[in-house]
Amino acid sequence: MNITWDEVTIDHLLHFEKVLPLYDLVFPIEVREPHEVFNQGLHYANSRKPNSFRFLVGLDGEQLVSFATGHYLEAVNAGFIVYIATNPLIRGKGVGSKTLLKMEELLREDAIASGKSNLDGIILETETQEIVHTHEEKENCLKRNQFFERNHYKKINKINYLQPPLHMEHEPIPLNLFIKGIQMDEFNRETINKFIHAIYKEKYSLVNGINEQVLKDSLRKMELDQESS
């Protein structure tokens, strides 16, 4: 398979609509943002440099094989991968790992463009088996967690992580938090605290537009309501 890579930007939306059906298929509703949040992320990317929003699309000819989205968080010199998915018709061919590596490469470029020598680490959230609804979703959840572990991401157990509610009527969502060290192998609770605050500010506040009090309540439930200095 010869994968070619494209990026969706505010000025280049060619493959945007092609991604949305795969996105809706793969992710449970609790962790699936409204489609307009992607547009908000694209606008954010033009206004918050050196912070970034990357929307990566993998193609085999005209067939969509994968996509991933992520942010570079300059305040903590870390990448945050929001979504990554592979077309179910072509799984088992290494596409997921190739997509993950390509997104990591883009986030490293953002770190270097901001004046750093490399990223300190890359963070991502994944759903737990407790929040999925069907046997198929449960199996996919387990496979996704194993996939990240194979790609050198470690589950963080120091904090019971909560994603703020993506839908008005929902409560914060317990998710697994994984981190891959780039320039260091282990991260203490204070560093993880800073990562989470940066995610909440740059992603969930400035891009998603989640109410400030809702974010504070979610941080308080994680006992992270005071940012480390």
Image: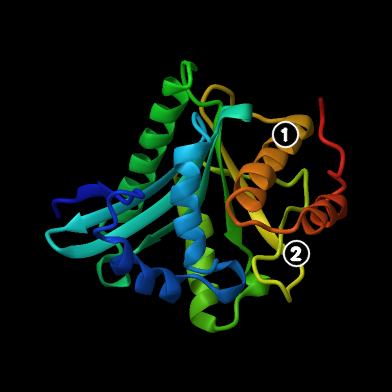
Question: In the image, residue 141 lies at what x, y percent?
Answer: 53, 67
Label 1 CA crowd tier, 10 Å (few <14, some 14–19, many 20+): some
Please give left or right for residue 15 compared with residue 134 in the image: left
Is residue 125 visible in the rendered structure shown here? Answer: yes
Question: In the image, residue 185 lies at what x, y percent?
Answer: 59, 27
Q: Secondary structure at mark 2?
A: loop
Residue depicted at x 67% and y 50%: 205
Residue 91: name its quadrant: bottom left
Is residue 94 visible in the rendered structure shown here? Answer: no
Q: Secondary structure at mark 1?
A: helix
Tag 2 near tag 1, CB within 8 Å: no
Q: Is residue 173 above or below residue 80?
A: below
Residue 30: name its quadrant: bottom right
Choose the circle earlier in sequence order: 2 or 1.
Answer: 2
Q: Is residue 136 above or below residue 27?
A: below
Question: Hey, what amino acid is under mark 2?
Answer: Pro
Pick the residue in front: 112 or 202.
202
In the picture, the quarter occupied by the C terminus is top right
Q: Which residue is the site of mark 1?
A: 194
Residue depicted at x 70% and y 42%: 196
Question: Hey, what amino acid is under mark 1?
Answer: Lys
Q: Is residue 33 above or below residue 188?
A: below
Q: Which residue is the site of mark 2?
A: 172
Q: Cα distance, mark 2 to mark 1?
A: 19 Å
